[in-house]
Image (cartoon, rainbow, N blue to C red):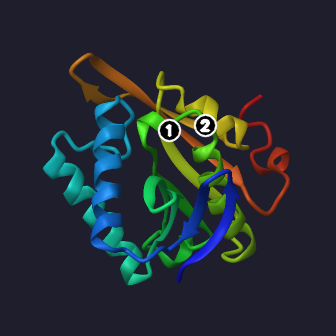
Amino acid sequence: MTSPLSEIGTVTIVRHPELTEQVRADIADIWHATTANGTPLEEDPPRTKHDSVNAADRALAAVERGDDHLWVAFDGPTVIGAVFLVANASRSEQHWMHVKAMMVRPSRQRGGVGSLLLEAAHRYAQVELRLDRLLLTVRRGTGAAEFYERHGYRVVGWLPRVTRTPSGDRDNWSMTREMQSDPDDAYPGLLQ
């Protein structure tokens, strides 16, 4: 289903756009460029362009099966960003989803595109899916945690030295955003 959700300037956010060969190629290209730029989009980031294409294909196949959700940012016909909401396999965990592979073409970062993508996904998660919360994992020291905190996420867990990189081991933070309840009541006493 294609439906424009929001626009700023010439940027349009579309949920579940038609996955043409060009859209697929653009998403894989942004996946690779974002990862090469030092921002991991998944726990084991792709190392080559071929790895990025495979990672994007797996994520897009889950969208096509109806398991996951996708929002794509377009500037005219050009894909400049995307974000996925990934479902849980367990029936007892259907009240929350993962935010995965949030990506914006490096030349378009820090211009509001990521915020538009995330807010469109939030609106859908809250209004249409009626989710209780969204969860994501970020690598400490990339600036991602601060971005997500500005969008209502809170750090709820920390995995020390869980990601090995050529420049050393990195910590991951688990973050969550409550969608239906007061976030101050979600984890009483946990983060005081």
Percent of width and height locating residue 156: 62, 39
Does residue 111 sit above or below 118 in this rendering? above
Does residue 1 sit above or below 176 in this rendering? below
Label 2 crowd bin: few (<14), some (14–19), many (20+), radius 10 Å: few
Percent of width and height locating residue 97: 55, 63
Location of mark 2 (residue): 111
Question: Contact, CB < 8 Å: mark 2 with mark 1?
Answer: yes
Q: Nearer the viewer, residue 149 or 109?
A: 109
Q: Nearer the viewer, residue 44 or 60?
A: 60
Q: Residue reaching furthest top?
A: 167
Q: How many marks?
A: 2
Would residue 62 appear left or right of 54 to someone viewing this image?
A: right
Label 1 crowd bin: few (<14), some (14–19), many (20+), radius 10 Å: few
Q: Quadrant of residue 161?
A: top left
Q: Residue at x 28, y 42 (%)?
A: 45
Query: Spatial distance from mark 2 to mark 1, Cα to Cα?
Result: 6 Å
Residue type pointed to by label 1: Arg
Quadrant in which the C terminus is drawn = top right
Location of mark 1 (residue): 108
Q: Quadrant of residue 24?
A: bottom left
Would residue 121 appear left or right of 109 to someone viewing this image?
A: right
Q: Residue at x 33, y 74 (%)?
A: 20
Q: Nearer the viewer, residue 71 or 41?
A: 71
Would residue 185 appear left or right of 115 to someone viewing this image?
A: right
